[in-house]
Image (cartoon, helix red, strand yellow):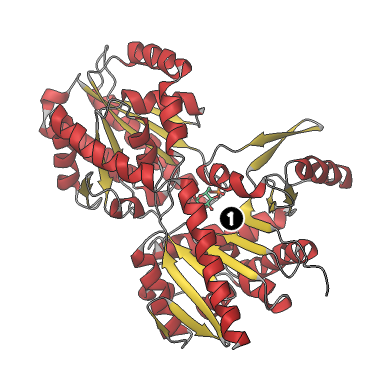
Amino acid sequence: MAAKQSSKTIIVSNRLPVRIVKEGEKLAFMPSEGGLATGLGSIYKQGDNIWLGWPGAVLNTKAEEAQTKKELKEQNMAPVFLTEQDIELYYEGFSNETLWPNFHYFNQFSEFNHEYWEAYKAVNQKFADQILKNANPNDTIWIHDYQLLLLPALVRAERPDISIGFFLHIPFPSYESFRLLPWRRELLLGMLGADFLGFHTYDDTRHFLSSVSRLAGIGNEHGHINYNNRQIMADALPMGIDYDKYAEVAAAPETLEREVRYRTSIGSEQLILCIDRLDYSKGIPQRLKAFEKLLERYPEYLEKVSILMVVVPSRDQVGKYKELKEEIDLLVGRINGQYSRLSWTPIHYFYRSFPLHALSAFYRMAHVCLVSPMRDGMNLVCKEFIASKLDKKGALVLSEMAGASKELSDALLINPNNRYQMVEAIREALEMDEKEQMQRMTVMQNTLKRYNIYNWVDLFMNRLSIVKKAQRSLTTK
Ligand code: G6P
């Protein structure tokens, strides 16, 4: 009898959990502190497992590529190299100017460009080639996010029996939005190369299943899809955070020391915290206008309440992001220009990223965390805020358009299009008594402790193996 081949897991995402920064001739490898990287650390760092993806910089020489491969191999990673043209057409183009706006219901921003589509197909193929070079038939492949929707089917075509999981980190839009894409059918069939497909919410799953039946004509029942004689499963698995890590960092001496320093320089009695990547889906201008309205309607907050707003630079080569940056700069300037006093600034605005201990100090200082996206797959900032509140004091105002709102019903939920509701929710949060803050926080903390990132990874892998076992038992019957 032939010896059983050992099996490994291959994680695949557009970005690796490490980013190359070019310093003159030298390459520096910066690890990512993102939640996904932490959670999947328990997988890709084991044994022969690997994580495949783009290392975040365009490399120009074979020597740079060789150095990158070597360095990454030591960390159980393998690079997929992208050219400048790939970045322009596949990443900035199809991924972020076509799919991203469509999936977030910003269809007026979606570009339908054939060149982008061709590049998207070619780069998905590039990823498939890398996987195929590394994969054995018994391996498990876990593919992540909207940049790689075609990849499951490309791998399936060459390895008909391999286990493939797919997780979408952004919303899956309603059929009415998704059907506007000229390549909707190809995209769905691409995803259906997977055996198990995970989404953050029940609604995302439902939207996906509806598109599968209405656009691809493939029937499904309770998340079970029969396609090409293969039983596929789709389900909701909301992603959590590394709760203990956030709670530990919030108790670290470095965080406490920063908190004291920051409190002295800000000086407001109450602080509202907002942290986002620069993105139109985050509703940053809408939120600034609500804050302006709050100051106009309730002048008693002048000189007492400030916003600390961190906007992390992102996708700055994409036109809509550049325009948004200008809009935010103007609004912040207008509001600060009108309301500032010598000893008080309404909006403390930072366009940069911060290290973890600084963010943790911000979470500790904040009386209110205001998370008001127009649309968000999950949103982890609100979860990090809750885990960092060791004394359970503070209130969360959360958009019902964020996937996280489905789990965090003890937040003050708002519709971000309703400015008056947002103003009143901020006021309610600022005025909430400590007993109520602690009651709400306790419920939310318990939820997040239980459904943490490690739990999410385990659940996903379990679901995938159950689907695979069921398929095998059907074929051997
Ligand atoms: C979202 C997406 C991720 C993406 C991240 C940062 O969270 O779901 O796939 O990596 O944004 O965006 P970027 O374009 O910088 O990778």
Is 403 placed above or below 27 here?
below
Q: Nearer the viewer, residue 467 or 35?
A: 467
Q: Nearer the viewer, residue 314 or 239?
A: 239
Q: Secondary structure at mark 1?
A: helix
Q: Residue at x 61, y 72 (%)?
A: 114
Q: Quadrant of the C terminus?
A: bottom right
Residue 373, percent from left and from top: 34, 49
Is 384 placed above or below 197 here?
above
Q: Name, please, the residue furthest toward the front.
A: 1
Q: Quadrant of residue 278?
A: top left
Q: Amino acid at mark 1?
A: Glu
Q: Quadrant of residue 426?
A: top left
Q: Is residue 433 left or right of residue 321?
A: left
Q: Is residue 10 visible?
A: yes
Is 230 placed above or below 33 here?
below
| Residue tagged 1 | 92
Residue 325, percent from left and from top: 44, 41
Q: Quadrant of the N terminus?
A: bottom right
Q: Is residue 475 left or right of residue 169?
A: right
Residue 110, percent from left and from top: 47, 64
Residue 186, percent from left and from top: 57, 78
Q: Is residue 359 visible?
A: no
Q: Name, please, the residue furthest toward the right.
A: 63
Q: Label 1: how many residues lie within 10 Å, few (<14), some (14-19) or many (20+)?
A: many
Q: Residue at x 48, y 59 (%)?
A: 100
Is 257 placed above or below 68 here?
above
Q: Residue at x 57, y 74 (%)?
A: 469
Q: Residue at x 17, y 22 (%)?
A: 302
